[in-house]
Amino acid sequence: MARDSNLVTFFVFVASILFLVIPINGNNLLYVLCQPEKGNYTFGSPFRNNLEQLLGTLASSTAKTGFSNSSAGDGTDQVFGQALCRHDVNRSVCGDCIRTASQEIMSRCNKRDADIWYDYCQISYSYNDFFSAMTYQGKYPDCIKQKNVSNPDEMSTALKKFMDGLKSKATSASSMFAAGSSKFSSQEHVYGLVQCTREITWDDCNTCLVGALGDLTSFCSRHQGGIVVSRYCNVRFELYRFYNLHSKGLDKAKMVLLVLGILVGALLLSLGVCVAFRRQKKTTTRDEEKDENVLRHELAKPIELSIPKGDLEFSDDMLVMNLATLMAATVNFCLTNKLGQGGFGIVYKGILPDGNEIAVKRLSRKSWQGVEEFKNEIKLIAKLKHKNLVRLLGWGIDGHEKLLIYEYMANKSLDVFLSDPMKRSQLDWRARYNIIHGIARGLLYLHEDSVPKIIHRDLKPSNVLLDIDMVAKISDFGMARIFSEKQNVANTRRVVGTFGYMAPEYAMEGQFSAKSDVFSFGVILLEIISGKKNSGFHLTKRATSLLKYSWILWNEGKELEFVDPFLLKSFAPADVRRTVQIGLLCVQEDPADRPLMTDVVVLLRSGPSVLSQPKQPAFSVGRDIALDMLSMPESSCTNDLTASTMLPR
């Protein structure tokens, strides 16, 4: 017990130190100003394209210096823009904020003049050259939402004097920034910050701050905090420290105390860790034995699936293999036999004693999602058989080791071909069309012919495997979900999948259905035809995503420019146009507009000579989004967005 208390004491100590030295985090959207009187721009217009190019330039340059202004294009379509980060944030935070603000202002405004402000950064753009043409137009986003102070008159007087002092500092500093605190009552302090953009003069900065502070004291001084933002300057005050400034240094006495404190803390930590490790080891052993027994019990239960005859048949020879056999088959999980890796584990090639080749997925020891995936794949998919689905042959469990055994796919995944120009050159139009058709047939079976209906939820090229004859087979059903016969839509608070292939309604709202898989299929179809990947797509002159690029060319009647150059000698133009159109129908933003896989298969086979016209797809899903690999239970409110590449071959 004494050692446990030491551990607690250490963590309290560390928390107190971190509180003193770690910058405050957080970046909230403050205000967006879209100027309606300045006119609109249209999608795909030269102005819009110049704006996208400009925002990309600002994102990279501002992160380095904290401020940047530039322009893109010429003539009436020229765009001028500037970006500013708060002087107290580092380069990484600055870059992240500018990228977020760029995406947000593009999604919220289609005006030719607009501004956006976050806690840590701001962006302004216009068709007009506004650099150094300082005019004050202040906005005060949320001070009226703050509670009133108990002594407003005293606060108002102290605030004006304090903020005027910060203004004087900022207008004589090269950074045009100042922050600090002041005591305005016996028990309370006020914290403030002022900043100007760096392209204006000190006199203009002073003029702008005078206007902003006038608004601040007029509208916010009776409240517990306030912010006024404008294109050229910003001011803010709070009754708590909200900025990230630190003292320039510590005197020798404080430094000695800090070092001694860290050394004592390290000693306490080592003692606490030893105790915790011993206890955890005992607990882990008991939990592993319990988990293994529970899993064996659950997997021994009958699989309650009603399965039609025909393409599907029961398999009563499921392999249940021990760890020693699978280690021998994979040469002790040698890295030279590694086929792929994802969020739940690594896949290895194995050879059984009878010479048969298998693929073994070794699930992560510590991932609870891996355990759920393990049970899900066995209970749900083990008895399904279709020529366009990868077969799960068996499983193995030994303590913390949980393994899934698949049929081996000689040509690995579609992703391997799309990312390698040499391999992609081997796929002519007929081979690619057959792969597209095979994926469609596999999805059709899951959605319509399987009872119950199955939604895959993570369809992407790395989960489309190719056998020795280049037949496409859908794999990895760990994220799949069962739908009842009459169910069409479901919702989840735990979003799983891969950005770039996730339907917008699923990524943003947690709503998934068969139409979510249709969207993923459409993205893959367009990738196969173009030879380009949607994730990481960059073509700044025309588009910033593969879907947007295909949509622009389609509307211009230039679909053939979308085609992979390796296909130029092997396709019929009419077939390509038709297939691109099918892909665009699948990636429409509204799920109701997308076809069912039944319709897609018919259209791919022959279908009507005239297809319906696709509507605009969702362009924003899957671009420039930081993925956070978490292991959270299904009940969590946190979205779990993975970038898995689990390749059971």
Image (cartoon, rainbow, N blue to C red):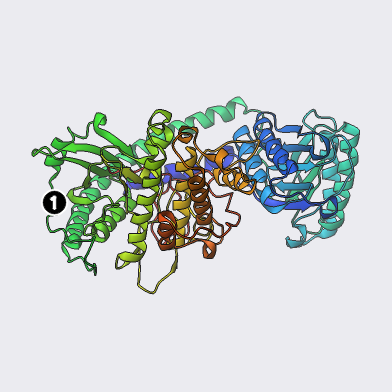
Question: Going 74% across and 57% down the picture, which residue do you hit?
Answer: 142
Q: Secondary structure at mark 1?
A: strand
Residue 604 appears in view:
yes
Looking at the image, residue 302 lies above or below residue 276: below
Judged left or right of residue 481, residue 243 is: right
Camera-nearest residue between 565 and 173 = 565
Looking at the image, residue 36 lies above or below residue 261: below
Residue 340 x, y percent position in the rendering: 32, 38
Q: Which residue is mark 1?
A: 320
Residue 55 x, y percent position in the rendering: 69, 38
Residue 187 appears in view:
no
**Which quadrant of the figure has residue 470?**
top left
Camera-nearest residue between 87 and 401 = 401
Position of the C terminus, as image quadrant, is: top left
**Which quadrant of the figure has residue 487?**
bottom left
Camera-nearest residue between 256 and 171 = 171
Question: Going 59% across and 49% down the picture, which residue do you hit?
Answer: 619
Question: Going 69% across and 46% down the picture, which residue do you hit?
Answer: 44
**Which quadrant of the figure has residue 252?**
top right
